[in-house]
Image: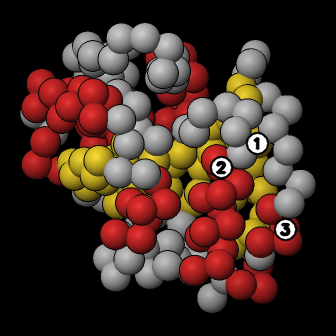
Amino acid sequence: MRVIAGTARRLPLKTIEGRDTRPTTDRIKETLFNILQNEIYGCRFLDLFSGSGAIGIEALSRGAAGAVFVEQKKEAAACIRENLKFTRLEEGGEVLVCDVLDGLSRLEGRDPFQIIFMDPPYGLGQERRVLEYLAQRRPSYADPDTIILVEAAKGTDFSYVPSLGMEVYRTKEYKTNMHVFIRMQEQERK
């Protein structure tokens, strides 16, 4: 696994041992960032269920103003810090070692993120918990123009999203997984 483009281009990234994390492949990461290319530069990026931090680090490498990584596992958080240091992107990154909902609560009162990315464990409904949290609290760090992006197993049900005052406006499917792009519904946008 490596950084695809930007200031840290081609630098390898560490991952933690074992099957607890599921790094996004370079090919899928490249496709994702081609879709987001006009949104990344200067944005504030939130990487939930960060794992090795590869997605947030890619955003920083491509010019994001800052990235916050939320990861519960201490070993993975240490890996993120090592990757930030190795890529010389540590100044733009902040690592929160906690449960994702606790991390979201800690971020209240901060400036809005332009992109919130999450790659939760598949099949546990974690993405729904996070989306419900965002919908119920309408936190200061997620405004109506924030792109909420979920990496999920192919076939994951997102039919509940409209009931949260949000809409799925794009889906990109791969062999076994997909990226789902979500935003506030038009009547909620200002």
Q: The C terminus is located in which quarter?
A: bottom right
Sort mark 2 into few (<14), some (14-19) or many (20+) by Cα contacts within 10 Å: many
Whether residue 7 is visible, yes or no, is no
Q: Position of residue 151 (x, y in %)?
A: 63, 37
Image-quadrant location for residue 186: bottom right
Tell me the residue that label 3 is attached to. 162
Name the amino acid, label 3: Pro
Q: The N terminus is located in which quarter?
A: top left
Q: Position of residue 149 (x, y in %)?
A: 60, 49
Helix, strand or loop for disc 1: strand
Residue 127, numbered label: 2
- The residue nearer to you, when weighing 82 against 116, is 82
Pointer 3 and pointer 2: residues touching (CB < 8 Å)? no
Q: How is the image coloured?
A: secondary structure
Tell me the residue that label 1 is attached to. 171
Q: Earlier in the sequence, mark 1 or mark 3?
A: 3
